[in-house]
Image (cartoon, helix red, strand yellow):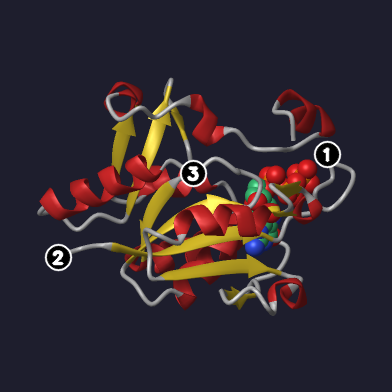
Amino acid sequence: MVKIESAIILCGGKSTRMGFDKQNIRIHDRPIVLHIASQLEPLVNEIIIVTNTPERYDSSGYRVVGDVLKDCGPIAGVYSGLLNSSSQFSYVVAGDMPFINQDYIRYLEKILKSTEEDLDVLAMRRKGIIEPFHAAYSKSVCPLLYEYIQQKNYRLYKLIESANTRYIEEREGSKFDITDEMFINLNTVRDLDDHNL
Ligand SMILES: Nc1nc2c(ncn2[C@@H]2O[C@H](COP(=O)(O)OP(=O)(O)OP(=O)(O)O)[C@@H](O)[C@H]2O)c(=O)[nH]1
């Protein structure tokens, strides 16, 4: 039976648009990454934080790994997370996306359990746009990720297009109360204000 037993949180970016390191954002009085992790914790056996400032999470109790390939952006974070994951499938989220929808993760797992095919990725496609986060990735996609990074082809959505991907279309997602909230990511101070954070 295929389960999503690991979750990967990426937080190795430059935060240029925010003007300060996004890992310093606090929600409910704790760092944003730990806020995200606490929502994922009831669903998975393992949480992996991919960061280039590991000392920050020394006492978090979570697994902390660095990028094996540096300065390539989120695609390299996904690659490092999957290489280090103990599970076939991992749920991948960005460290600036504070809203986790547990029902959605359970739904992805249901799809995995009922699909005969060997999938590489389960990803939401909204208005034709592929969402690379809040997606489940299999370790089977690692060779393709490596190839993309080596070719300096850093666009995750392109990789998802060429992998064996099961798309969750917007209408399908809406059945499970999946709202736009899940895909909010915090890039600017304005985003923080807009969401009262
Ligand atoms: N591990 C890892 N995560 C990354 C890397 N680049 C971006 N991320 C993460 O991927 C998510 C999306 O990143 P972006 O907001 O597009 O990039 P950013 O560098 O954080 O911010 P900007 O400089 O404003 O573009 C965030 O959670 C980042 O922390 C990287 O090189 N390694």
Q: Amino acid at mark 1?
A: Arg
Disc with the residue nearer the chain's start (1 vs 2):
2
Q: Which image quarter holds the N terminus?
A: bottom left
User: x, y percentage for residue 136?
Assistant: 37, 53
Foreground tag (3 vs 2): 3
Q: Secondary structure at mark 1?
A: loop
In this view, 4 is above or below 98: below
Which residue position is annotated with label 1?
A: 17
Percent across and percent down for residue 121 are 34, 51
Instruction: From the viewer's side, name the closer residue of 111 and 138.
Output: 111
Q: Is residue 151 above or below residue 67?
A: above
- Residue at which label 3 appears: 100
Q: Residue at image x 19%, y 58%?
A: 118
Gap in Å between the C-alphas at discs 1 and 2?
A: 42 Å
Number of residues whose C-alpha sits closer than 10 Å to that of mark 1, classed few (under 14), some (14–19) or many (20 or more): few
Rate crowding at label 2 as few (under 14), some (14 to 19) or many (20 or more) other CA atoms within 10 Å.
few
Question: What label does residue 120 carry, if any?
Answer: none
Check disc 2 and report the residue beneath it. Answer: 1
In terms of sequence position, does the residue under pointer 1 or pointer 3 come before the other? Answer: 1
Q: Residue 72 vs residue 104: left or right?
A: right
Quarter holding the C terminus?
A: top right
Indicate if the residue with disc 1 has its beta carbon within 8 Å of ligand 1.
yes
Local crowd size for mark 3, using a 10 Å CA cut-off: few (<14), some (14–19), many (≥20): many
Secondary structure under badge 2? loop
Q: Amino acid at mark 2?
A: Met
State the CA–CA distance, disc 3 to disc 2.
Answer: 24 Å
